[in-house]
Amino acid sequence: MITYKIDELNHGQSVLQFLKQQGYTRNVIVALKKTPEGILLNGRWAYVNEVLAANDILVISLIEEPSDSSIVPVEQEFDIVYEDEDLLVVNKPAGMPVHPSLGHYEHTLANAVSYYFHQKGEAIVFRCLNRLDKDTTGLTVISKNMLAAGILNEQMKMRHIKRTYYAICSGKTSVSGTITAPIARKDNSTVERCVDFKNGETAITNYTLLSYDEKKDLSFVKLQLETGRTHQIRVHMKHIGHPLIGDFLYHPDYTYIDHQALHAGELDFIHPITKEKMHFSSDLPVEMKRILTSV
């Protein structure tokens, strides 16, 4: 339930105009119309074309029926970094897929989160904002309602969400750089991606060299995404000749680590409901720290 007190700036707006201004998507507004007492204006049910006045009290109640019946609640440990009524921020471990798929039905983040809320007596539809690869570690955000999900997805489209990754790759990279190379699915593969200047979708990755280990010939880099293509960092770093170590698809060198050395270390966005600036950070996993001890 969200309560708004209408101020002078919103005086004269319709309920619909006000909700759109707050970031409510068309799908959310349609759902509200179908929800009994979903929109209350000064304690009574209201239509979206009604006009608001200063000091009016608008109360929004969005009730969802969970539809993820295919996601089986399974007890698993996972690290909760932050939680409120609208969001859950998780530090995902390596080896845990985000969603169930062929061969991964019961040991995913979705299963773990489903169990967590089941134990709390809460029911949510699993909506993960930044879907990390199975072996990528770090921060990911789960929206607990369709309003938060819709607003955050719009932030993602507008590139207002800042995602910072850390990786260990082969060779010595430039001090910094921007990789602009379109990415497409590789022919005859359902998983692998490649740079494809003819058929690929726009993909932009910025990187900065943090340190270089001459003995191991490894670079520790910070990366920030301007787009969010599947395997973007992994494909882009291979494209410039510095693939991530431990990457079974693009550089299966397991000398130092048994999965890609990639960590989603920082996340910045505006809270979809409170509009507060949110910043989260996560330490490198032990297996990556171990590689860097001599750097």
Image (cartoon, helix red, strand yellow):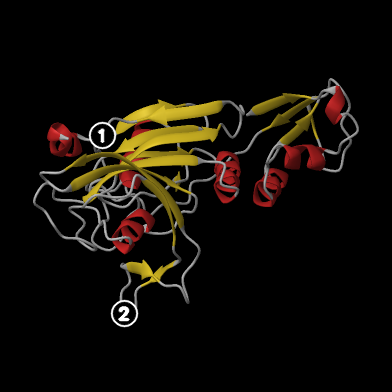
Query: Which residue is farthest top?
Result: 55
The residue depicted at 44 percent of the width and 27 percent of the height is 83
Q: Is residue 259 above or below residue 290?
A: below
Q: Is residue 83 above or below residue 253?
A: above
Going by the image, does 159 lie left or right of 29? Answer: left
> Crowding near pointer 2: few (<14 within 10 Å), some, many (20+)?
few
Residue 284: image tag = 1
Query: Could one spot residue 118 in this view of the protein?
Result: no
Going by the image, does 32 lie left or right of 90? Answer: right
Query: Could one spot residue 108 in this view of the protein?
Result: yes
Q: Position of residue 125 (x, y in %)?
A: 47, 45
Quadrant (top left, top right, bottom left, bottom right) of the C terminus: top left
Q: Is residue 2 above or below residue 205?
A: above
Going by the image, does 31 lie left or right of 8? Answer: left
Secondary element at tag 2 = loop
Q: Position of residue 105 (x, y in %)?
A: 27, 55
Which is more toward the observer, 83 or 192?
192
Q: Is residue 49 above or below residue 133?
A: above
Q: Position of residue 279 (x, y in %)?
A: 46, 28
Q: Which residue is mark 2?
A: 188
Query: Which amino acid, mark 1?
Result: Leu
Q: Which of pointers 1 and 2 lies earlier in the amino acid sequence?
A: 2
Q: Position of residue 85 (x, y in %)?
A: 51, 28
The label nearer to you, 1 versus 2, is: 1
Label 1 close to label 2 by CB (< 8 Å): no
